[in-house]
Amino acid sequence: METWFRWIVACCSLAVLMVPFVGRAQQAPSQTADPAAPVDSVLAAGQRALAAGDTAQALMLSHAFDAQSEAGPVDLRLADAYLQGLLRAGVDTHEDEAAQAYTSILRQAGPGLDADPELIVRRHVAQLAPILPDATKEQVLQGASVEEAAFAPTAGTTLVQWWRRQDPLPATARNERLIEHLQRVSHAHTHFACADSECEPTGWDARGTVYVRFGAPSRRQSVAFNDTEFNREVFRFGVPVSRHDFPDNELWVYPQIDRTGKYLFVKEDGYYQRSPTKALLPPQLRGGYGGRSERTLNKAVSAIAALEHIYERLSQSHISYAQRYSTIANYAGWQEEQARLIDMGALSRSRSRTVGSGVGQRKTVGPGPGPASGYPNEFVSNHLHQSASRDAQDAKRRAQRMPAAHSTVLDGTERLPVAVRAARFLSEAGSTAVRVAWSHPPDALALSDATEQTLDDAGFSDPAGHLVRLRAVQQDTAFRRGDTINQQYFVARDANGRRAPVDVQTFTMTGDSDPFHVGLQWDQRVALSREDGRIRRGPLTKRTVYRIDSLAALPDSTAGLVMSDVMPGRLPSDAAPRRAAMTPYPFATLDEDRPLALYFELYNLRMDAEGRTEYTVEYRVERVTDKRGIRGVFGGDERSQTVMRSTYEGSQPRTEEFITLDLDAWDLTAEGMLAVTVRVTDEHRGQQVQRTLTFQDAREGR
């Protein structure tokens, strides 16, 4: 009896999975699984729910345990059925659930999957592959193509970590970029689905791939082939083409990303493909222009009319087609003018030919102006060749300049300029701490006229000032979220509407993995009022994010001489050069009104028999004009460098170093970077370490 019952459950499970799921996105399940429950019990509960016909509950159970816990694999068939149901219904109201189900599927990418689960994972990886960097693909796939390559043993871990790194707003709990990807996948499934085997394994045509990469195009246009003039000029007696021979097509352009961002899709063999311009012509008009027979010339006249129509429409959406349209239109116009002059008797017919038959269909043609034009058949043949060459050049430039993907998550909000510097130090306990200094350039909080007008229209015309909030999130090696630091400050307006200067802010985080990462997010909001220390927040006006990735832990101090990073700073104009008076300086450019201060720490200096340390500190300032990088540091042209050396003695293996550099000898407005290198030599062991800071050409601005 028990075996018979299990067979019934399995059949019911398969039957339910074959039914397209749409109801889950509209209602919550009757109950939820305990996230702490063992994986086997969760899956068993899912199977029982399927057997009972409770599809919604079963699919919820398939991904119910915490995705961050990585407790174990979910049932891939159930998780995928659940996710596909959300994608069909739209993920907007179930973003977190969709993201969790999607992540649970990707996590299982790797060798050893059964046939059906492997197809599920491979489909999702294929849909993701166009936006993955090549280096990440190599870590995921052991082969050339998604369809045939074997999964690497750590493929799932790599994909999950990559998605964590793409999180555009580290201060929020959700990954907005991943959700945006799922929304695009949902749209591609709905609008660009393709059942043909050529579209596998993504399940959509070429439009879907471009949509997943870049989202909706700025402009989208189709060339229609049904107006009266087109019919009269193209569909000529003796030319074997009809309106149905011209393919459906779409041109997508993304000028907001780059001017090379144009993609032409032509429906061929039943589905849309990325195609050259030539594909907009029927196969009958793409070739066969040898000789000057009446039939060939007549076909060329139709092709010229079709090309003129095509380029005239395409040039409305992208300027790169304008020159081609001009070339075609000028040639067609010249032929019409020559025919008119011949009919008037003002021009000889000696080199002209009359082609076509029927009222309004007869055309007098001849060699065009210039040696490159020739008769219509020669002109069309040459033009199609040149057009193919231009398409290839456009494709090459597009591949170089268009990114693998473009996110619009941060669109619609002004960018808040922020300057950031980070330096690693060793704590007394030997752990690596990163000290981060940040501030805003002058007038960074000023709003654009458009934003000011939007605030006025919304009734926020006289705010008390601005509130800036920083949230810094520490992430471990796998980009899992850890500790969070929050900072905020209020900036008031004075009577003249100017904003008070912004002080340099600092914070420290201690890494608990090697390497570790820090994600930073700043939000600027209107401060509506400030009373009794309480600030009433208004609309978001500016935002920016910044990442400090792959912060390697400093070496253990027992391994030899260890040096921290160098933190630059400035001193008040009336202050003595001492460490306590230094303010960290996060900006990328320098000014001439105050000297540059440098602070760093040394660890594990060797002590001699008398308990003394001896070390030499060398400071070198160099102008770097080679835009390919810093070259010549400690070995370049001495005429462009300033070098200072000092030898010190001490009684502790750990010490703090502070120095001020007078930059009067350097033109801070000159071209090129300014590189400041600090080299330390432990005289007792002969070991050297060094760090380099760079500052930009002051003309580039802060």
Image (cartoon, grey):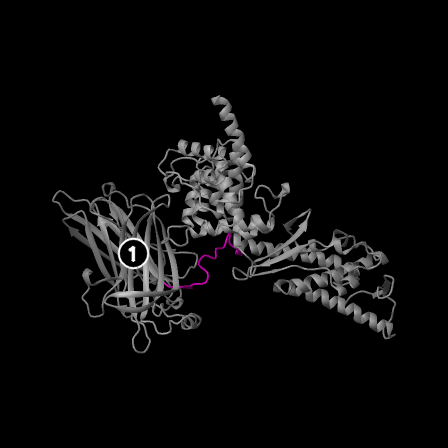
The reply to whether the magenta stretch includes residue 529 is: no
Q: Can you see residue 185?
A: no
- Circle 1 residues within 10 Å: few <14, some 14–19, many ≥20: few
- The front one of 552 and 677 is 552
Secondary structure at numbered mark 1: strand
Residue 36 appears left or right of 385: left
Q: Is residue 562 visible?
A: yes
Secondary structure character of the magenta stretch overall: loop
Image-quadrant location for residue 340: bottom right
The answer to whether 97 is drawn above or below residue 657 in the figure is: above
Across and down, in percent, residue 72 comes to: 40, 35
**Residue 657 or residue 15, whichever sits in front:** 15
In the depicted structure, whether residue 500 falls above or below residue 587: below
Residue annotated with mark 1: 486
Q: Residue 463's spot in the image, x, y percent?
A: 34, 71
Observer-nearest of 233 and 181: 181
Residue 684 location, quadrant? top left
Place of residue 688 in the rendered image (x, y in percent of width and height, measured from the top left): 27, 48
Task: Judge from the rendering whether residue 700 lies leftward or rightward of residue 615; answer left or right.
Answer: right
User: In the rendered structure, which amino acid carries the disc numbered 1?
Assistant: Asn
Residue 409 located within the stretch drawn in magenta: yes
Q: Residue furthest left?
A: 610
Residue at 44 percent of width and 43 percent of height: 29
User: Picture coordinates of residue 467 (x, y %)?
Assistant: 32, 65
Which quadrant: the C terminus?
bottom left
With respect to residue 702, does 127 lie above or below?
Answer: above
Q: In the orientation shown, which residue stands out farthest toward the bottom? A: 496
> Which residues are drawn in magenta?
401-417
Compare residues 543 and 356 and report the one nearer the observer.
543
